[in-house]
Amino acid sequence: MFNSSSISHFLLLPLAHTRQLQLLHFCLFLAISLAALLANGLIISAVACGHLLHSPMFFFLLNLALSDLGSILTTVPKAMHNSLWDTTNISYEGCVAQLFFLLFFISAEYYLLTIMCYDRYVSICKPLHYRTLLGSRACAHMAAAAWASAFLTALLHTANTFSLPLCHGNALGQFFCEIPHILKLSCSKSYLREVGLIVLSAFLFFGCFVFIVFSYVQIFVAVLRIPCEQGWHKAFSTCLPHLAVVSLFLSTAAFACLKPPSVSSPSLDLSLSVLYSVVPPALNPLIYSLRNQELKAAVWTLITGRFQKHKTSGSFLQITCNKRHL
């Protein structure tokens, strides 16, 4: 029998049980983490250094890249360490820190994606009010609210989870510390408090989801009213990457959380956890850079050090074909 005061470490789920597969997972995670670090780092540097990218859309993209970096650095290095040294241990304090930062960065990413949806909505549906509604001060306040809300969410869940008495061992069925697997170790009905917090967070996340869906309905209606194909292309080139990132984030997380217990297995759970915790931070920069010519030009300028002239548009006013249609 264990209790929370006697637990000094937790046992994480190993990625593989043979040495060859462990080394293979180490190399795979190393490649993914390096790609994520390079891609997100380039986006952060390009937006921070490129004065032509100092617009609300790229400001929020910079914040999203920061959350992606934090998310992948929270789980992957420990998994790589365990695979390389053939161990599954994580200290009690390390598990607390890992859970807090994972919740913090994932929550921040979801809130930032919601704000980025609002940015696209105002840019396309209310272009005349774009500079008023999304000035530099308003953008800073919205970004600060997203990070502060994520901090509060992570703090409440982490404090409540580790305040529970744990007496069902110290083995977690996941390769990183996660709330559902920690709750399985609890021997007290007080875990219902954490369930209540999860339900409250689920309602908040669902509210953000409804806002995103409603905004995109309005966006698509507005785009279909544009009288020229050039306006369609410009609108979709800025909206489709965001929509793809939101879909990737929500679909992987929802399937991992809502899959029926009958199809659950350690290998499937491990694959799904990698899918929603590791893959999106690595793919998000690629998705955003594929259709964004301004971002690609800025990154290329950053890499080559050459000066390239390229135009940026701060609002939807600059992408319409005829001013009389505003």
Image (cartoon, rainbow, N blue to C red):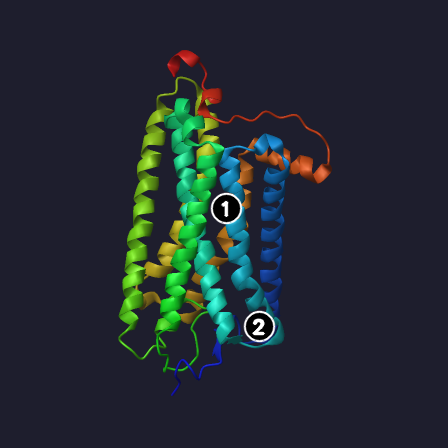
Towards the viewer: 214 or 35: 214
Quadrant location of the N terminus?
A: bottom left
x 52%, y 51%: residue: 68
Mark whose residue sits in front, 2 or 1: 1
User: Can I make out residue 66 in this image?
Assistant: yes
Towards the viewer: 51 or 325: 51
Identify whether 324 is placed above or below 182: above
Quadrant location of the C terminus?
A: top left
The first of marks 2 and 1 along the sequence is: 1
x 44%, y 36%: residue: 138
User: Can I make out residue 271 in this image?
Assistant: no
Q: Secondary structure at mark 1?
A: helix
**Res. 126 image quadrant:** top left
Q: Secondary structure at mark 2?
A: helix
x and y, in percent, of residue 75 in the image = 52, 63
Amino acid tagged 1:
Leu
Q: Which residue is mark 2?
A: 82
**Number of other residues with Cα within 10 Å of mark 1, as a class: few under 14, some 14 to 19, many 20 or more:** many
x and y, in percent, of residue 143 in the image = 46, 43
Q: Which mark is residue 64?
A: 1
- Taking the image as shown, residue 298 lies to the left or right of residue 215, namely right
The residue furthest top is: 324
State how far apart marks 2 and 1 are (Cα).
28 Å
x 34%, y 66%: residue: 263
